[in-house]
Every structure is written in C-alpha cells, then in structure tokens.
Image: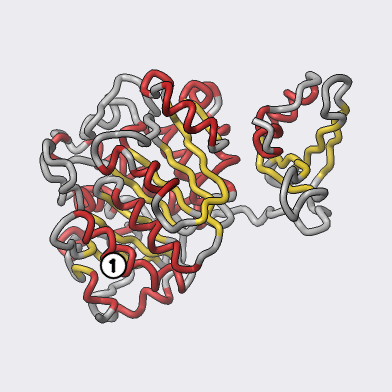
Amino acid sequence: MKHSEYFEIGSTLELRENCGSQQIGGGLWDTEADFARWREADLVIVGFPENRSLESFPLSVAAPNEIRRYLYRLATPTTPFAVADLGNIILGEDAEESVHIMAAALEPIFKENKPVLLLGGTQEATVGLCLAMAEDESLTRYVGIDARPDLFGKTAPDSFHYDMLTRLPINLAHFALVGLQQHYMTFDEREALRRINAEIVRLGVLQTDVRQAEPPLRLAHLVSFDMSALRQADAPGVRFPSPTGLSVEQACQIARFAGMGYDVRAFALCETLPPLDIDGRTAHAAALIAWYFIEGWYHRPMDRPAADRHNLLKYAVSMSSGPVKEVVFYKNPQTDRWWMEVPAYTGAERGRTKLVPCTERDYQTALRDEAPDKWWREYGAL
C-alpha cells in the first residue's frame, strides 16, 4: 500500500482558502501536488478523526478540521516555515482497526525523524502513536497532560494508560502525568501510579508555578494532551467538563515546553468534541495549544548538557541528616534550566550517576536540608 493512500490528501484545502502567506494555512507545504515532499518538512501535522468507541457521545469526526479552522489563521511562528499537513488518516471499519492504520501511516514518518503534531479524536490516537513508535524498539519517555489518570475507565479512551503500561509493545523508560486533579483519582489509581513510580505534577502545583511542568517534558518522546485538562470556561466541548483545570494560557505554556523538548517525536492533542463545542471555544483553545507546540519546537534551546558538563554550573548541597549526604545540581547559565545528579540504584548502571531535569524549587528544597522527592523517585526509593 502506498504511503499516500493512508491519508485524505487535499481534505484541508478548503480550510486554507484566503489564508495569507504569513499565516499557517498559507505557509503550509502543498502535499497534494507532491506528497513525498513531507520528507523535507521540519514538522508534520496529521489528523485522526476517530471516536467511535464513545457510543453514548456525539461523533467528533470533524474535530481535526475544526481545530485547523482556527490554527490555519494564526501567524506562522517563524521564518522560514516548513510544516506539512498530510490531512486526516482514513479510518478503518472500527476504532481498533483505525488505530492500526494510524500506526502504519505514521511509522515511515517516525523513521525519517520527523516530529508529528497529531490532531484527534479520542485517546486511541495515543495508542496508535505508541504502536508506531514500538517498531524501533527504543525506550520511550511518555508524558500525559490530563485531569484524570485514565487507568481503569470503562471505555477504551478512559483506560488507555492501563493498556500502555500492560498490553502495548512499547518500552517505557519514564511515565509522567501532568495536571492531575486529586478529586478525580480513586484509591486504586493512586496506588497503581505509586507502584510504577510514576512522576506526578498535580494541578495545584501548576497553579502556583506552571514552570513545574517543564522538567518531565524536557526529555519526553511522546506527549498526549487531553483537552479535558482545561477548565470548562476555556474548553466546554469535552466529555468531562470541569470548573477546575488549566487555563488556556497555562496550557499554551505547557505545550511550548513540550515543543522545546530535546527528543519530542509526537504531540497528540485529543478529546475535542465539536458537537458539544457550541461556540467553537474548545477548538480555538486547541488551535492555540497546537500553535505554541510548533513555536516551542522552532525555538528549542541548544542547552543539552555536554558529556563533561562544561556548559553547566555546579551546585553541591550537603545534607546534615538522613542517608543522603550530598545532592548535586547543575544549571545552564544561558537558559537557567536546572538538572539534578542522581546515582543509579540498580542494574548495570549501578555506581554511575544520571542527570535528571528539575527546577530551582528542587534546589531550594535541598538548601532546606531535605532531599527533593524527585531525587528519591529517580533513585528508585519511592
């Protein structure tokens, strides 16, 4: 099967009409004339209009194009701008088949090392991304932005994290959830996340300082953003609208952090339901989030630690009590991004150390003579 046959090529042309050359819709590369040109693009946009697993909810097959309707009219975040939109993936007979079609469609894109901005659809989109990435058998660092853990739900989109952890052939090196709200988590879900040593950044922490979302995103390969993480005032067109949640401004900042990650391969924007989005507010918010992911990707800082760490400033903090005698931090003086040194606890790496993304808040915690929770988690003792 030819690669182009997985996509509805040209399905977005109407949305691009009347867009200027300095707007995203007018600046996109024309893959209808030459589909293979996506290999020259910096970044690829794909739509996945699937939600047939939600029998009790209106179909949202229009979701990717509703997001595009707003995204295309935003200004291009940089010049030159080399982004290709391949259109929507052609769906299968049912949601499960669509997921496998999506995996087959995206696998060649990942092999070319092109990051994918995926517009969904339900969270089956994230499952398809996992299957596509599993082909190269490398370790994957995952971050989900969501209000709920999506572990033990009754529908496929509400249990996809459980599938990711137990059923899918993906090698997870790190599992993090950002924006979780404690009142939506059951005891069993909290215990499950504790057992797998998941990194959790709760909504309350982000409300105090949204920059706390940046460390887990710095090394992430796959990021899935559920629009239900936003508060209802900003995103009413979702299955689980809530008066509590992220603001659009906070969500855009988090998306920018994701784009700025060193190794990001895919950013999935899921769970927009146009039939419930009466005034288009949710699709508009999703478009802004997508824009900030693109903008972040084009402005990634070149501050990855050197092998000898010569580009970092070292801060060693002595501990006067407890089993930890010293916690070592590093900071890049150009970007002010922090790292923490953690000894490897088990396996072949035992005796070595690793650098873990952190924030200045972790450094301030150590100055109070207390090893940060992140240190213990990465050490394997939590």
Q: In the image, 105: left or right of 350?
A: left
Instruction: Name which residue lies at 30% across and 65% down.
Output: 85
Residue 9 is situated, as x and y percent measured from the top left of the image, at 21, 71
- Front one among 212 and 328: 328
Whether residue 260 can be seen here = no
Q: In the image, 153: left or right of 192?
A: left
Work out which quarter of the rendered image holds the C terminus and state it.
top right
Amino acid type, callout 1: Leu
- Front one among 342 and 292: 342
Tell me if residue 308 comes above or below residue 177 in the rendering.
below
Tell me if residue 233 comes above or below residue 261 in the rendering.
above
Instruction: Name which residue lies at 55% across and 26% down.
Output: 209
Work out which quarter of the rendered image holds the N terminus and state it.
bottom left
- Front one among 230 and 156: 156
Location of residue 232 by image quarter? top left
Residue 262 is situated, as x and y percent measured from the top left of the image, at 58, 55
What SS does tag 1 mark? Answer: strand
Residue pointed to by mark 1? 86
Q: In the image, 373: left or right of 181?
A: right
Residue 102 is situated, as x and y percent measured from the top left of the image, at 29, 63
Tell me if residue 185 comes above or below residue 289 in the rendering.
above
Instruction: Name which residue lies at 32% across and 50% down.
Output: 74
Whether residue 10 can be seen here = yes
Location of residue 323 by image quarter? top right
Tell me if residue 224 comes above or below residue 233 in the rendering.
below
